[in-house]
Image (tube, rainbow, N blue to C red):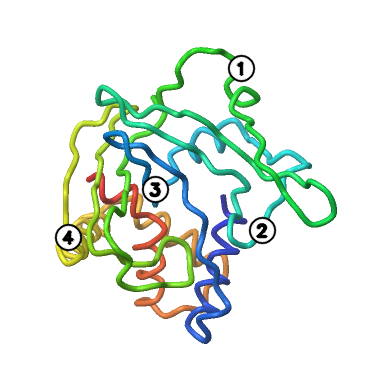
Amino acid sequence: MRRILRALLLVAGLATCTIAAATAQAPDKIVLNGKEYSLNTNPLSPYLQEMKWKAPEEAVISSANWRAYIATWEITDNKLILKDVTIRVQSGERDTVKKSILREIFPSDETVVATWFSGALIIPDGERTQYVHMGYGSMYSHYQIARVSKGNVTELVSLNGEEFSDYKDKKFLIFKGTDEYKKARVELLKDGSDMTPAQLDDFMKSFYAEEYLAL
């Protein structure tokens, strides 16, 4: 995790100088009411970190997908279900193809409910209104926010772009009063960030969104 944070901090620092230095990330996918959307949250990450997962050597990793995989999710009967996990593998000299690794991570044939995950799912379902070339920083005209507790979807909030920005501001203010925020800030500063306090808060507001939006 600290290596990821260090890399992201470097990207964030470069982004203050040139927009081309950073890279937007390929999102997971989620099916909601029969329609597929991009998911600006990575619910599988806590599970993979806990099991000390490493991407297969055959996985093609790019600056647009540092985590190496794309997970596909579905909300069914108020539960967050993992449908698939894919990587890109080389096919010929220049092409790549998708390969499922779901059963390498979860060998059982049983439905995978994300019981390890508690947080907020950020689902842009409107038009993009502002492109930001870093992480999931782009803004959209409308969002759905699903609050999840141990794999159970407890609330689904529908917000326009302005309401979403206000919602994030209020939730982040609450987050700044928590021990988690204070510890994370100390860790980030240990990684040698030379960003200003405001820039560091902007980074944390983006990176920790799934945690504080669930408060």
Mark 4 vs mark 2, CA separation in Å: 32 Å
The residue lying furthest to the bottom in this view is 17
Q: Amino acid at mark 3?
A: Leu
Mark positioned earlier in the residue sequence (2 or 3)? 3
Residue 188: give x, y in percent of width and height: 49, 63
Q: Quadrant of residue 154?
A: top left
Q: Amino acid at mark 2?
A: Ser
Res. 157 image quadrant = top left
Across and down, in percent, residue 183 comes to 41, 54
Name the residue beneath numbered marker 3: 39
Relative to the observer, which residue lies in front, 26 or 116? 26
- Compared to residue 161, the image places residue 184 above or below, namely above
Residue placed at 68% from the left, 53% from the top?
61
Residue topped by disc 1 = 107
Q: Which residue is mark 4?
A: 160
Read off the residue under disc 2: 62
Q: Secondary structure at mark 2?
A: loop
Q: Is residue 176 above or below residue 33?
A: below
Q: CA distance from mark 1 to mark 2?
A: 27 Å
